Amino acid sequence: MKSGYKILWTDHAISELKNTLEYLEENWTERELSNFSKELDHTIELISKNPELFQVSKKKKEVRRAVVARYNNLYYRTKNDTVEILSLFSNRQDPNKIKI
């Protein structure tokens, strides 16, 4: 097992992260927002250390899915020594909207 994979966010994933944070800032407390941020950081750290830790996506075999704070799924794939974050999908949305 390799450790310390480089993390790369796609433009799409960054856009989803911005939208998620805007929603959370409007609807959650500072404490809940802080907890979400910690969960996201922890999940990314785990992925960086062991990208095969989380389950393979049902739609694409090269993509994996990590649940972040039960309301969001983080979709990613590994390329050489890089983990590419493809999507931070809110589970409150229609699952057919996932673009991975």
Image (spheres, grey):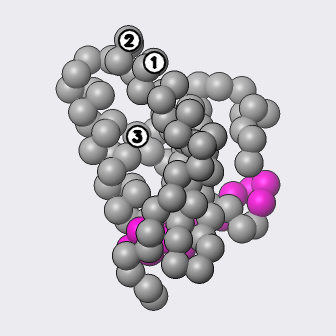
Query: Is 58 situated above or below 68?
Result: below
Mark 1, secondary structure of its residue: helix
Q: Which mark is residue 26?
A: 2
Q: Which mark is residue 53?
A: none
Query: Is 33 situated above or below 66?
Result: above
Give the CA separation, mark 1 to mark 3.
15 Å
Q: In the visual, does 47 lie left or right of 31?
A: right
Query: Is residue 43 magenta-colored?
Result: no
Q: x and y percent of residue 62 in the render?
A: 72, 68
Query: From this viewpoint, which residue is outermost toward the front?
Result: 11
Q: x and y percent of residue 48 in the render?
A: 41, 68
Mark 2, secondary structure of its residue: helix
Query: Which numbered disc flags the more N-terminal residue, 3 or 2?
Result: 2
Q: Which stretch appears magenta?
A: 48-60
Residue 69 falls in image quadrant: top left
* Quarter of the figure with the N terminus: bottom left
Give the CA separation, mark 2 to mark 1.
5 Å
74 or 86, which is in the foreground? Answer: 86
Q: Report if the CB atoms under discs 2 and 1 are less than 8 Å apart.
A: yes
Q: Residue at x 31, y 39 (%)?
A: 37
Q: Residue at x 40, y 57 (%)?
A: 44
Q: Residue at x 24, y 33 (%)?
A: 34
48 or 66, which is in the foreground? Answer: 48
Q: In the visual, does 1 lie left or right of 75?
A: left
Residue bearing the label numbered 1: 23
Query: Is residue 58 magenta-colored?
Result: yes
Residue type, numbered disc 3: Ala
Residue type, numbered disc 1: Tyr
Q: Main secondary structure of the magenta part?
A: loop
Residue bearing the label numbered 3: 69
